Image: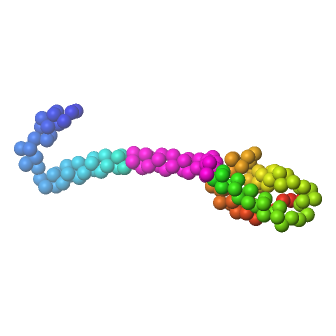
Amino acid sequence: MNKNELIENEKFDIEKMNGLSNEELDVIQKRALAVQLERVNDKLEKIEITQNNQGKALEEVKHDLNNKITLDYGQQAALQHAKKKRVEELWKLGGEFQKVLDTKRKLHARAWSELYRSFGVSSYRDVKSKDFEEAMEWMSVWRPQIF
């Protein structure tokens, strides 16, 4: 039944409603409110479903940011610089490692090799962005393992 039919229908005839008792009018009003409340609840449920879906999508984006995004160019350059600085410091200090790593080139290679192992990557470019600060700290205190 469409709106026009409802309006024309004698059930909604104002003249007949005037003849109803207050109790009968209260029943009609309660039923109308119940229908409206049900409609509001349906809309609220749809909104909650949409919100939950958006929350899930946001969690996926956060997961990607934390677990898939690697260092940007600036972070890569900073890590390279930190490695170069650390190698120069260690080379000037000298030590037992120079018996095995007799050139700076070998010391540079060892720094990368141990970083790769520590962070589970095959290149410093593959270090996760979320691990950048940790990688910088790691590099600043790194000492070559002598095996």
Residue in the image at 16% along x and 33% along y: 5
Which is nearer the eye, 74 or 85?
85
Q: Position of residue 20 (x, y in %)?
A: 11, 49
Residue in the image at 89% along x and 60% along y: 97
Q: Position of residue 110 (x, y in %)?
A: 83, 53
Left or right of 2? Residue 88 is right
Residue in the image at 87% along x and 54% along y: 103
| Quadrant position of the C terminus in the picture | bottom right
Provide the residue span drawn in magenta: 45-74
Q: Which residue lies furthest to the bottom in this view?
A: 93
Q: Say whether residue 86 is visible.
A: yes
Which is nearer the eye, 129 or 39?
129
Q: Where is residue 141 in the image (x, y as percent from the top left)?
A: 76, 65
Residue in the image at 19% along x and 49% along y: 28
Is the magenta region chiefly helix, strand or loop?
Answer: helix
Q: Where is residue 125 in the image (x, y as percent from the top left)?
A: 69, 47
| Quadrant position of the N terminus in the picture | top left
The reply to whether the magenta stretch includes residue 75 is no
Q: Which residue lies furthest to the right in this view?
A: 99
